Image (cartoon, rainbow, N blue to C red):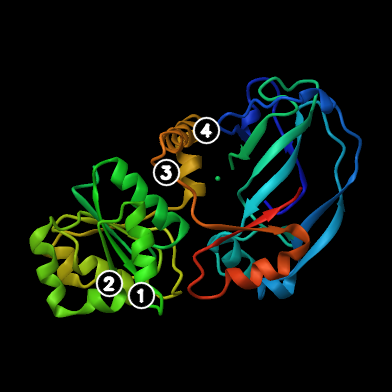
């Protein structure tokens, strides 16, 4: 969420929660430096009033912060990523679009600076994140150098699963391959290599994947399907190529392949906050054990948002742009 301070309705008592989840290790000292109430103030936010190129339609504005009620929480955002879904939303290409004008971004980490009189689930000083955010022996995925792709590599390795990681060819392909293998990737191949007929020999030394993770679409997703084991499933969670997923009739009938979609926002609605919290804590446990690390990031001050947005839409950029509000 690309805003310095956000107001969240806590719904009193233990329900904070509807809008916020405590971050791992969220109890921070120096709570005394914050008050239990706050007066309306001006805050900075990245706002867009129309859809288009992010660097051209997003503006840094000063907004009036609404006065806090008894069941509300004031959160100062500390850092927020620029994700592909955020870019698509600003461009107007996302499945669900907010009413304009809108503040950009959907994720981030913040610190509670004030709480209403009815709030007991969090206190000033706590760090929080917004809440409204059988695999087989091997997994194949495209866009493997993305933030999600890097996480998949590490989580699969922690679970003892082998990964086949597809990336676009590029001048520094060996450097990228080495970096992904350092994370735990077993195989890294390019889109072009995956399309070659000889690739079928590749699977003689390892089981065909039963799960494919697709965030590209188009020809790339078709290739993932072609290499899935009979009865396998492809989960699509993005469409960076802006091309449809195409599956032949024979794949569906004779290979019994299954196509599923995944949208985190809908998953959270279907499963509730308790399961989402459990998911976050599971990931935090992997982080604490050193089995999951964040992708390469570039911290960019909020005032330099144009540079961060321009970088986010460039090809072959593996560094996540993180807007910082300190």
Q: Nearer the viewer, residue 184 or 51?
A: 184
The residue indicated by pointer 3 is 292
Q: Is tag 4's residue or tag 2's residue first in the polypeptide sequence?
A: 2
Q: Is tag 4's residue or tag 1's residue first in the polypeptide sequence?
A: 1
The residue indicated by pointer 4 is 273
The residue indicated by pointer 2 is 222
Q: In this view, does 132 lie above or below 104?
A: above
Q: How far apart are marks 4 and 2 (CA)?
A: 34 Å
Q: Distance between the residues labelled 2 and 1?
A: 7 Å
> What x and y, as percent, mark residue 317?
51, 69
Mark 2: give few (<14), some (14-19) or many (20+) Cα within 10 Å: some
Q: Which residue is drawn at 72% across and 37% down?
A: 8
Circle 4 — which element?
helix
Mark 3: give few (<14), some (14-19) or many (20+) Cα within 10 Å: many
| Residue 166 visible, this orientation | yes
Q: How far apart are marks 2 and 3 (CA)?
A: 29 Å
Callout 2–callout 3 Cβ contact below 8 Å: no
> What x and y, as percent, mark residue 185?
30, 56
Q: In which quarter of the image is residue 203?
A: bottom left
Q: Is tag 1's residue or tag 3's residue first in the polypeptide sequence?
A: 1
The residue indicated by pointer 1 is 218
Callout 2–callout 1 Cβ contact below 8 Å: yes
Circle 2 — which element?
helix
Q: Is tag 2's residue or tag 3's residue first in the polypeptide sequence?
A: 2
Q: Is residue 152 above or below residue 130?
A: below
Callout 1–callout 3 Cβ contact below 8 Å: no
Q: How far apart are marks 4 and 1 (CA)?
A: 34 Å
Q: Is tag 4's residue or tag 3's residue first in the polypeptide sequence?
A: 4
């Amino acid at each position: 969420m690309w805003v310095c301070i956000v107001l969240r309705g806590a719904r009193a008592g233990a329900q904070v929660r509807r809008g916020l989840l405590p971050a791992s290790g969220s109890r921070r000292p120096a709570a005394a430096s914050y008050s239990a109430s706050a007066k309306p103030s001006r805050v900075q936010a990245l706002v867009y009033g129309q859809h288009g190129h992010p660097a051209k339609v997003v503006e840094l504005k000063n907004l009036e912060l609404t006065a806090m009620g008894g069941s509300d929480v004031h959160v100062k955002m500390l850092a927020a990523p620029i994700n592909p879904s955020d870019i698509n939303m600003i461009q107007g290409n996302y499945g669900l679009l907010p009413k304009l004008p809108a503040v950009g971004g959907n994720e981030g980490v913040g610190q509670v600076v004030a709480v209403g009189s009815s709030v007991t689930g969090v206190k000033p000083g706590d760090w929080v994140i917004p809440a409204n955010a059988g695999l087989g022996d091997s997994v194949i995925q495209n866009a493997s150098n993305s933030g999600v792709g890097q996480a998949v590599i590490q989580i699969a390795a922690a679970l003892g699963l082998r990964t086949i990681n597809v990336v676009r060819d590029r001048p520094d392909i060996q450097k990228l391959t080495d970096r992904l293998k350092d994370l735990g990737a077993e195989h890294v191949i390019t889109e072009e290599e995956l399309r070659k007929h000889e690739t079928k020999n590749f699977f003689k030394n390892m089981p065909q994947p039963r799960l494919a993770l697709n965030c590209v679409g188009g020809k790339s997703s078709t290739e993932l399907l072609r290499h899935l084991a009979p009865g396998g499933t492809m989960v699509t969670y993005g469409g960076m190529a802006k091309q449809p997923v195409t599956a032949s009739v024979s794949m569906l009938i004779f290979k019994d392949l299954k196509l599923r979609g995944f949208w985190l926002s809908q998953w959270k609605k279907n499963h509730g906050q308790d399961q989402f919290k459990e998911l976050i804590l599971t990931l935090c446990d992997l982080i604490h054990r050193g089995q999951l690390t964040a992708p390469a990031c570039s911290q960019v001050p909020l005032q330099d948002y144009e540079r961060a947005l321009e970088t986010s839409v460039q090809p072959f950029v593996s560094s996540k742009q993180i807007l910082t509000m300190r």
